[in-house]
Amino acid sequence: MIQFNIPPYVGTELEYVREAIEDNHKLCGDGPFSRRCHEWIQSRFGAQKALLTTSGTTALEMAALLCHLKPGDEVILPSFTFSSTATAFVLTGAKLVFVDVRPDTMNIDEKKIEAAITDRTRVIVPVHYAGVSCEMDTIMDIARRYDLLVVEDAAQGVMSTYKGRPLGTIGDFGCFSFHETKNYSMGEGGALLIKDSVYNEKAEIIREKGTNRQRFLRGQVDKYTWEDYGSSYLPSDMNAAYLWGELEVADKINENRLASWNAYYDGLRPLRDDGRIELPVVPRECAHNAHMFYIKCRDLDERTALITYLKERGIAAVFHYVPLHSAPAGLRFGRFSGKDRFTTVESDRLLRLPMYYGLTAGDRDAVISEVKSFYASR
């Protein structure tokens, strides 16, 4: 069986977890391995401030809280995304305003954002699908002209760039995921990146159950007290130890995934050239991280048939998001701005192929061969 995903493992993770337990005697959050991860993210991506979180979801929740949203405020986002992108803002009482996607990248259509803005709009949330950046210059220009905050959902975008700038560092806040399905994993985990230091202290308080614990540990205050609202967003240092093993060889992982992505692209290009399928589009200004490889079938029926065909031959291939605006919660918490021209029809065609660190050339070639065989039989 060729699995769709196998969590990354490079070989040093268990030794680092052992070190956290036996040598450091530090299992809770913000231990030595958490600090190493923070420093690596800040140094590698030029982030002003990075804080590990328990998930990409809670990174988004922290960003939503730092935006100081009130009930009735509006947040613009694509409908083609995971529920976490939406729920983080729903928890603040904000109203969701969904915008159509571009069919080439499946990212929010930057040309549709301005028409969705009202006097209640406060935040734009670009989601970098498949690790390919949204058109950030246009989005940031709109945000500045309308005095809006930008929260980048870069859950899939670690190591990707837009015009040389790392994803997650362009907007006011950036959110990473280190879930087991992502390029770099700590099992469950994420990170919040903060652009302006004015938010640093507030973020630390929110992350530490509403207390000033970080200032106390730095010796900046002599009392450890409850200051404001917050929650426990710190991951265990054992999880951070696992992640540290992968960040040390981040380039190796990235290169391995890109090799698989490029092999898929080259192997399936003939089907694209014959008009049988569509392949991912990466705009010239974007450098992606091979988070996923997808194809687009002719329609939903063809996609369903291909999934079944591959499953019968021991290959796990899966579709992706069901558009949020058509889901029960989406109908309750949001509205679609303009016409759904591409979101639903394109999501019905999209099929993801197996992609993970360590995917063998043999398995990759088998996937390509079976996809070609499917289309040869039709």
Image (cartoon, grey):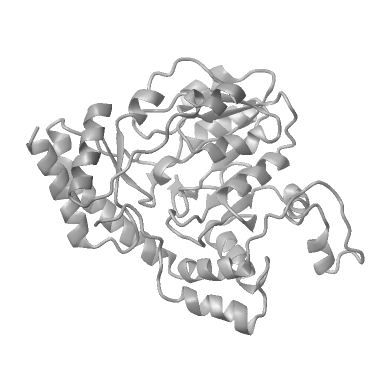
Q: Is 149 left or right of 98, judged from the image as shown?
A: right
The image position of residue 9, as x and y in percent, is 41, 68
The image position of residue 284, as x and y in percent, is 35, 41
In the depicted view, which residue is nearer to us: 24 or 327? 327
Q: Is 164 left or right of 123, judged from the image as shown?
A: left
Q: Is 190 left or right of 202, judged from the image as shown?
A: left
In the image as oriented, which residue stretches furthest toward the left?
A: 377
In the depicted view, which residue is nearer to us: 58 or 50? 58
In the image as oriented, which residue stretches furthest toward the right?
A: 222
Q: Quadrant of residue 259?
A: bottom left
In the image as oriented, which residue stretches furthest toward the bottom?
A: 23
The image position of residue 11, as x and y in percent, is 41, 75
Q: Is 187 left or right of 377, judged from the image as shown?
A: right
Residue 91 visible from this viewpoint: yes
In the image, residue 302 above or below residue 191: above
Residue drawn where x is 81% and y is 62% of the image:
213
In the image, residue 91 above or below residue 6: above
Residue drawn where x is 21% and y is 58% of the image:
363
Residue drawn where x is 39% and y is 28% of the image:
102
The image shows a total of numbered marks equal to 0
In the image, residue 9 above or below residue 269: below
In the picture, which quadrant includes the N terminus? Answer: bottom left
In the picture, which quadrant includes the C terminus? Answer: top left
Residue drawn where x is 31% and y is 55% of the image:
258
The image position of residue 239, as x and y in percent, is 56, 66
Residue 299 visible from this viewpoint: no
In the depicted view, which residue is nearer to us: 349 or 2? 2
In the image, residue 107 above or below residue 234: above
In the image as oriented, which residue stretches furthest toward the front?
A: 312
